[in-house]
Amino acid sequence: MQMLDAKSIVALATCNKQLFADANNAFAFKFVAVLRIREDETKYENSLLRFHMNRMTTDFEIFLRKKSHITYLSLWLLRHDDMTQITNTLQSNQTLVRLDITSVIFYDAGVDSLAHMLSENKTLQTFLVRSTSLSDDQIKSLCAALQKNTTLTSLQMSNVGMSTRGATHVANMLLTNKKLTQLNLDCNYMGDEGLFQIANALHENATVQSLVINDNKITDAGVRHLAHALTLNKSVQILALCDNNITGISLLSLAQACATINTTLKWIDLKWSNFQMTDIMSFVKISKSFKTNVQFIVHRRKRFTKIDSMLRNMNECKHIVQG
């Protein structure tokens, strides 16, 4: 197989999605690992590394021992046995700050190993797992580990198949975790019941500042419950609810929360929702009572193109941003 120079490796890492989509591409390896190190050592040959699938685990273990300064590790398309061995290797690592895992096949042993690493690690600040199927029990194991973690500030679990039960495990974690500030649960299936659990946890949690729950089969009933929770919560500043099954009822419920008690929300993203012009008009009236300069991001459906011109002619709409 042809070897790549350092710049080609950088290009490969940048366009990996296209390469993986082409099964006939000579450079489409089964899995790729990208390692980024501290800013004072950002030479091409040190900042990025990829492993051949037959020597993945061995090379990774050797590299990690030699490069004890690794702070950012991103893994794609790993098999369950490789992931288990890699997380076992990471158990003793004391420099990793960010770990990204994408499109990995996880068995319970791999999740247990990862959970143990998360519970013991004292340096990790950002953990992302995406496009990876996780069972409710596996999510439970990871959340139980994060209840013990004292350094992680950013968690993303997007497109992992999270159900209502999985969201309940996340909510339980939020009741005890006092460090997490950013939570992203994009593209899952928590629904209203799952959002109820997250909202209830926000009654007690005082650290989460950013909550992203786009595309989660949520309806107005779930958002109403969340809006009530946000009248009690004093930490959430950014909220994203794009591409859910919500209408103007949700827009007005959140607006009412901002108009009555909540003074911390700064940015609410509601793109791709079903808002009518009458909803916007009602929102404008409520916005006059807002306690802060919170911004609502909305995206009109094509049949409501008149909303744009209407907003341009209304000085009261400073709280609405067209997405």
Image (cartoon, rainbow, N blue to C red):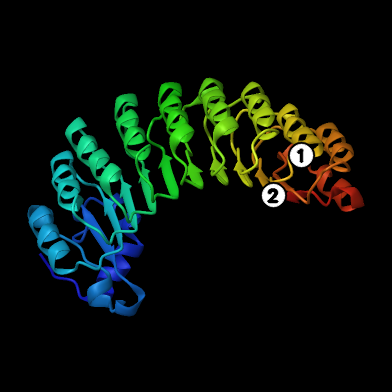
Residue 299, horizontal then vertical, whole percent: 69, 44
**Relative to 116, 228 lies left or right:** right
Q: How far apart in space, not on screen, are marks 1 and 2 (Cα)?
A: 10 Å
Q: Secondary structure under badge 1?
A: helix
**Relative to 223, 42 lies left or right:** left
**Relative to 25, 147 lies left or right:** right
Q: Quadrant of the N terminus?
A: bottom left
Residue 47 visible at all: yes
Q: Residue at x 73, y 39 (%)?
A: 262
Q: Residue at x 88, y 46 (%)?
A: 310
What label does residue 266 carry, if any? Answer: 2
Residue 252, horizontal then vertical, whole percent: 77, 32
Q: On the image, which quarter does residue 162 sit in?
A: top left
Q: On the image, which quarter does residue 176 sit in?
A: top left
What label does residue 258 carry, if any? Answer: 1
**Relative to 274, 205 lies left or right:** left
Front residue of this view, candidates 305 and 176: 176
Q: Secondary structure under badge 2?
A: loop
What label does residue 9 carry, if any? Answer: none
Front residue of this view, candidates 167 and 303: 167
Number of other residues with Cα within 10 Å of mark 1, as a class: few under 14, some 14 to 19, many 20 or more: many
Q: Earlier in the sequence, mark 1 or mark 2?
A: 1
**Does 233 sit above or below residue 75?**
above
**Does 246 sit above or below residue 213?**
above
Q: In the rendered structure, which amino acid carries the disc numbered 2?
A: Lys
Q: In the rendered structure, which amino acid carries the disc numbered 1?
A: Cys
Q: Residue at x 10, y 62 (%)?
A: 62
**Does 2 sit above or below residue 203?**
below
Residue 98, horizontal then vertical, whole percent: 35, 56
